[in-house]
Image (spheres, grey):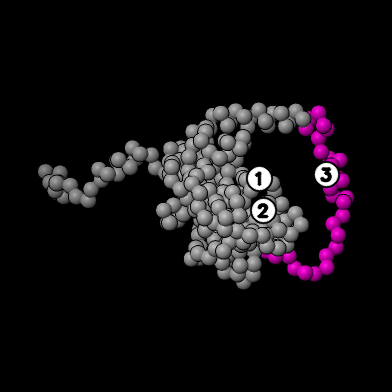
Amino acid sequence: MTRIGRLALLLAAAAVLAPPALRANALEGFSISVLVDGVPAPEYGGRGRVYIEALEGKEFVIRICNPSSERVAVALSVDGRNVVDAKRTTALDAAKWVLGPGQTADVPGWQVSGSTARKFFFTETSKSYAKWLGDTSNVGTIEAVFYREKRRTPIHAWKDEPAQRKKAESPAPSAAGEAEALQDSAASTRAREADRFAATGIGDQTAFPVEWVAFEEDPAPAARIALRYEFRPELVRLGLLPRVRDLYARDGARGFEHEYAPDPYGRQR
């Protein structure tokens, strides 16, 4: 049974067992992968990121892996939204999935109740869950942040001075307001232009029972792994996949031609 837990303001979850999968996008053994029809999607490295191809209309599952000998909590987001509650928070504050030692979990969709998830599927931004929620500024992203369990040892209290300095160095309210307005305007423009790009929908119901458990994480992440996904035309534009005409040209290649070997003596006569 999958478990979701809470400690004060911390939410956490533990997930079902599945075969371990160590992917190329693993960090210190922690890994995520996207499964389509039960098979890990091919990954393409480039531009400092790892990409996969989004297949429009196809459902997918996110596999998260904990190879360590201790429990870990995993904050998992799709299109910038936590898959447990669809909220926008920091990874530290997010609801998390808890994996036991050596455990792997297949997360099938958005968790909409204690017993049900709604399946992930690739779609256009205009038809996505993010669009319905009113914020498409982070579509095309899948990110997992792994946290180890906090050690039960005394620690020094954090001091307030750094936060106070940061606050004092922040822009004046008017400048901050102008910057925020510009960001909002740019985000709105990007959203209108990118409605046809890949995003994730919220699909059919599937049984995925959960319950709350206690977990207190170490605030320093053990690993942070991100994937980008795009439809094929965008992967081609990014230079990660060959253009179609290049593939057609390769179809005309062959190993032998109906010709004879050149005769160097013949050319001298």
Describe residue 156's horizontal placement relative to residue 245 as left or right. right
Could you tell me if the residues under marks 2 and 1 are in contact, i.e. CB atoms within 8 Å? yes
Q: Which residues are magenta?
A: 147-176
* SS under mark 2: loop
Between discs 1 and 3, the one toward the N terminus: 1
Task: State how far apart marks 1 and 3 are (Cα).
Answer: 26 Å
Q: Which residue is mark 3?
A: 166
Give the residue furthest to the bottom: 69
Give the residue displayed 54% in from the left and 61% down from the top.
Answer: 105
The residue under label 3 is which amino acid type?
Lys
Q: Residue 71 at what x, y percent from top left?
A: 64, 67
Quadrant of the rendering where the N terminus is positioned: bottom right
Could you tell me if the residues under marks 2 and 3 are in contact, i.e. CB atoms within 8 Å? no
The residue under label 1 is which amino acid type?
Lys
Task: State how far apart marks 2 and 1 are (Cα).
Answer: 9 Å
Residue 115 vertical placement versus 246 (above, below): below
Residue 234 vertical placement versus 205 (above, below): above
Give whichever of 162, 249 is nearer the camera. Answer: 162
Closer to the camera: disc 1 or disc 3? Answer: 1
Give whichever of 108, 80 is nearer the camera. Answer: 108
Give the residue displayed 55% in from the left and 51% down from the top.
Answer: 117
Q: Which residue is mark 1?
A: 87
Task: State how far apart marks 2 and 3 are (Cα).
Answer: 27 Å
Describe residue 256's horizontal placement relative to residue 232 as left or right. left
Between discs 2 and 3, the one toward the N terminus: 2
Q: Which residue is mark 2?
A: 95
Between discs 2 and 1, the one toward the N terminus: 1
Residue 197 vertical placement versus 116 (above, below): above
Give the residue displayed 48% in from the left and 66% down from the top.
Answer: 19
